[in-house]
Image (cartoon, helix red, strand yellow):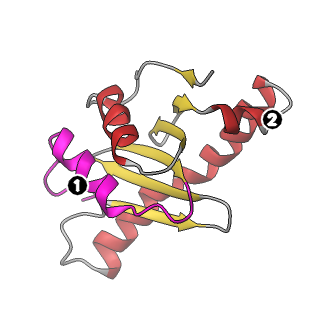
Amino acid sequence: MPATNRSKLTEFDADRVRKTVQDTVSGPLFTFCEYDTESFRPLYVDDRTISMYDSRDAMLEHFERIHTNVHMDFMQSKLFKNTLFPEAERVEYITTAMDFLKVLRVYIGDDGLFIAIEPDEPVVPIVDAIKATIEWPPNQNS
């Protein structure tokens, strides 16, 4: 059975966004986490992902290692927005594609969503669905 938690970190309804993302993806949703620069919270972890780990503690330890690096996304998005492309109003998302997994990190104000999906899953429909679900903050990353 998948593991689920209720949202506690974001200023928007991340639980509603998770449901929207689950309805949007054509393949499996492996994980869905909310995060900021200080902490993260897994809101959904599917059975396949859980089975990759020897224990719940091992899984959370790996998620903690991931988050230790993912928080740098906020600094990177500010670099893109403020230094490299100052004409941009915001950085909306970053995607990392690997041979076995694609990670989509979406930025909504000072909050982030970490979404793990199949490598061939298109990300634009997911981002569009998120934008249609919540109020997108103007001029974020400034």
Q: Amino acid at mark 2?
A: Tyr
Q: Quadrant of residue 100?
A: bottom right
Q: Amino acid at mark 1?
A: Gln
Residue 58 x, y percent position in the rendering? 80, 32
Among numbered discs 2 and 1, the one appearing first in the sequence: 2
**Vertical placement of residue 129 versus 142, above or below:** above
- In the rendered image, the quadrant that contains the C terminus is bottom left
Q: Which residues are magenta?
A: 118-142
Residue at the location (40% across, 49% down)? 25
Q: Secondary structure at mark 1?
A: loop
Depth check: give the residue in front, 119 or 114: 119
Q: How far apart are the two marked residues, 2 and 1, measured between alpha carbons?
A: 36 Å
How many marks the image carries: the answer is 2
Asked whether, in this view, residue 137 is left or right of residue 47, the answer is left
Residue 136 x, y percent position in the rendering? 17, 47
Residue 63 x, y percent position in the rendering? 67, 39
Residue at the location (62% across, 53% down)? 69
Residue farthest along the right direction in this orientation: 54
Depth check: give the residue in front, 8 or 141: 8
Residue at the location (34% across, 46% down)? 24
Depth check: give the residue in front, 55 or 77: 55
Mark number, residue 140 = 1
Q: Quadrant of residue 13?
A: top left
**Vertical placement of residue 119 versus 4, above or below:** below
Asked whether, in this view, residue 127 is left or right of residue 53, the answer is left
Is residue 122 one of those drawn in magenta? Answer: yes
User: What secondary structure is the magenta-colored segment mainly?
Assistant: loop
Mark number, residue 53 = 2
Residue at the location (29% across, 29% down)? 16
Q: Quadrant of residue 31?
A: top right
